[in-house]
Image: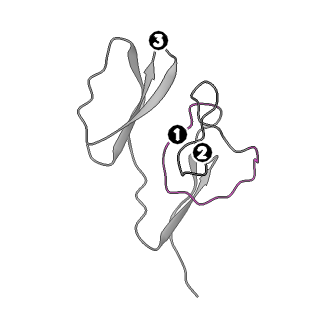
Amino acid sequence: PPHFYIHVLDLKTNVTKTTIGPDTFVRQDNEKVVEGPTRMVIIPPNHYCVVANPVMRDDKGGFSFGGVAAERMPCSDDSDEDDDSEEESEEGEEEELERSVQQLSVS
């Protein structure tokens, strides 16, 4: 369905990928669905949320990958960056919603 995603583990490479709907997903013999379908977090205009353990991005805006194609996590434990993506790390701790979607107050 639209605005849902699943995590699929490739048993040959031991790498988890995220498949985003709407899409017809046909599981291969070497794949296993490890999570989902999970509803995405929708952030309307003039709203925000706080994500714990956000995935790092490189200078071009893409994901920062390590040597084994796993996304790198920031070193700091007290990172309070606002992020609207729900991409999940394949290494270490998962991204999670620390504070729910809230209206941005402008004073």
Extent of the magenta region: 75-91
Quarter of the image containing the N terminus?
Answer: top left
CA–CA distance between discs 2 and 1?
7 Å
**Is residue 78 part of the magenta span, yes or no?**
yes
Q: Which quadrant of the structure image shows residue 23?
A: top left
Residue type at mark 3: give it: Lys
Q: Are marks 2 and 1 in contact (CB under 8 Å)?
A: yes
Horizontal and vertical percent for residue 90? 56, 31
- The residue depicted at 59 percent of the width and 60 percent of the height is 82
Task: Please indicate, yes or no, whether residue 37 appears anywhere in the rendered image.
Answer: no
Horizontal and vertical percent for residue 92? 65, 32
Residue type at mark 1: give it: Glu
Horizontal and vertical percent for residue 28? 31, 16
Kindly identify which numbered label has been placed on residue 12. 3
Is disc 3 surrounded by few (<14), some (14 to 19) or many (20+) residues within 10 Å?
few
Residue type at mark 2: give it: Val
Kindly identify which numbered label has been placed on residue 88. 1
Residue under pointer 2: 55
